[in-house]
Image (cartoon, helix red, strand yellow):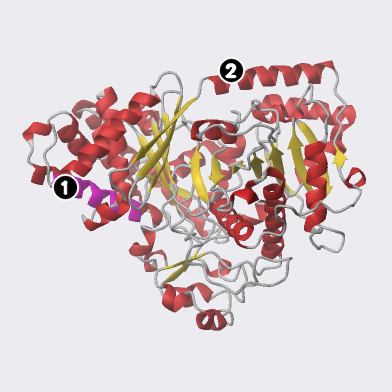
Amino acid sequence: MANLLSLQFSASVRHTGRLVSPRAVSLTQRRYKQDTSAEYLHKSIVPSMHYQKSLPRLPVPKLEDTIRRYLAAQKPLLDDDQFKTTENLAKDFQSTTGKILHEELVAQDKSNKHTSYISAPWFDMYLSARESVVLNFNPFMSFNPDPRAEYNDQLVRATNVVCSAVRFMKTLRAGVLAPEVFHLNPSKSDTDSFKRLIRWVPPSLSWYGAYMVNAYPLDMSQYFRLFNSTRVPKQGRDELFTDAKGRHLLVMRKGNMYTFDVVDRDGNMVKPAEIQSHLNYILADESPAAAHPLGVLTSENRDVWAGLREKLVAAGNGEALQAVDSALFCLCLDDENMRDHIHTSHNMLHGDGCNRWYDKSFSVVLARDGQAAINFEHSWGDGVAVLRFQNEIFKDTTEKPLVHPGSTPTGVDSADAVRRLHFHLDDELRAGITTAKENFDAAVSKLTIDALEFKKGGKEQLKKQKLSPDAVAQLAFQMGFLRQYSQTVATYESCSTAAFKHGRTETIRPATVHTKRCAEAFVQRPGEHSVEQLVDMLKDCSKYHGQLTKEAAMGQGFDRHLFAMRYLANAKGQALHDFYQDPAYGAINHNVLSTSTLTSPAVSLGGFAPVVPDGFGVGYGVHDDWIGCNVSSYPSRNVHEFLRCVDKSLEDIFTVLEGKPIS
């Protein structure tokens, strides 16, 4: 069934790093009837999970294809002798251990048709990781400001975001949130008449009905983890906790923690004016900042945090922790204004460690000046659900806000409704918090973030030249790194496999023989090639990158397949084949360039830390007439120089596309 999926679709569902491309989930073209009730965002006539049962299953690639693709990705990273060694190891693996592991993986997959072969190993990878979730896993996506400046008041915006979030939750749980569908031909598939028809098609066949009109439903199995969910630290492997019965919100300010109900006993949203009153009460609370802010423990090593959490429970804090874990989500009200994009990135990515609970499935961070962002924990999902949520919240708060500048909070007694959480701490717990804060400060002090806005061209110009905008951006990163360090290194661009049941991600490998050849021509030998030759090289890069993107979206990369076989061998206690011990295998999985693209009407910028100490974390967006990058690094790399090199690379590419030679 997988081969029925259109390759044209596959190029549209790429998402990179840890953020999702909205081409798969864009709301700009989404059409549905708005519901007048304050309880729901809308009421889709097609049930939210209508397509889930009939989604195609993620294919396990053929082993020979995986090895061929792996070797192609290794080619630009190795010299001839190294490549020969790696090739021999790969061929031996393919004909011996790999063949057996592949057959076992296929057999296991056939006996678990309710899920995908990558789902359980991928959950396990995240939950077994012992590093701090801060910088290592949690990314952020910041909201654009409300177009009407007066609605960016902290209290007004916080109230509207909370109300819209509750409406989203209720819409989802009522099964009337419009299903996540990518429409290749919206005039046929995104219509009331088609929806009235498809809702009567049995769920076991509904995907085929959508496919007949070039529409591709996406997996929504992760959505239930959006609300009332928390990653709970445990020794060796964490657990995901969800309690859909929780009716309260967790609010943090100055490291202090508060809860109040946003849903009443009958399941209705609390009146917006009451929510506003409760938030106003918290913002007016003159209590000092928490002397021992518990939230910083969520930034610790997971085993350390697990041990301290056990001590917290033993000290009588179990009920308060239960309130934190079961809250709908976390709202972090910060007391400072954002100075610029760089300050915003640092604050939304990590903040000061005290006014966050990084383990919540997601937190909305709202600065004093109304700038807002989502910071989300990564183990439960890949961002598809988070971006859909963010797009819907932005649309709802800007088009149908429930409170307004000048709205008066009701006279309800918020002192009764708002509960401040108090924790009993002994000397050992206080010392643990102090140490966690010291570790946090040491970690984030090493992170540098810088940004670039290239204004001399963008998506429109590149498409006129029949070049993939994403391929050109990726090429600029290859050129920039080569210009700065005279090297080609392992590069990661992730791709959503949400077109399949319980799909997660696959990796696009943007460093190729084509980008290496092109980068060397532009950077090291520009005078040796004509403009026409350079343009031809750009086209080769774009064509090959497009092929890699299509393969990855169809579940036909090599990274997840090799990972799953290695996971299987480890689970059986088998010694790993020398293929997995090859330094080249280690190097290609040491992703010096980790990249993520994002453009959405709701999002102003996104970001994450490097995934390795000597790497760059590259968040970027290719817009109609400009290209933006938001890049992070640790001390072993110079992010400012890297962006200067990327800027020069983009300038050279656009100069050549204008038919002019470069110097």
Residue lying farthest to the front in this orientation: 406
Whole-percent x and y of residue 247? Answer: 81, 53
Residue at image point 21% right, 55% down: 465
Q: Are marks 1 and 2 in contact (CB under 8 Å)?
A: no
Whole-percent x and y of residue 499? Answer: 47, 61
**Residue 442 disc label:** 2
Q: Is residue 340 on the magenta stretch?
A: no
The answer to whether residue 225 is left or right of residue 594 is: right
SS for callout 1: loop
Whole-percent x and y of residue 523? Answer: 19, 31
Amino acid under disc 2: Ala
**Above or below, 275 relative to 596:** below
Quarter of the image where the C terminus is located: top left
In this view of the protein, which residue sits in the foreground, 307 or 611?
611
Q: Which residues are magenta?
A: 535-550
> In the rendered image, which quarter is residue 355 located in?
top right
> In the rendered image, which quarter is residue 572 located in?
top right
The answer to whether residue 74 is left or right of residue 637 is: left
Amino acid under disc 1: Glu
Is residue 619 visible in the rendered image? The answer is yes
Residue at image point 41% right, 23% down: 614
Quarter of the image where the N terminus is located: bottom left
Disc 1 target residue: 658
**Above or below, 91 relative to 226:** above
**Above or below, 545 relative to 138:** below
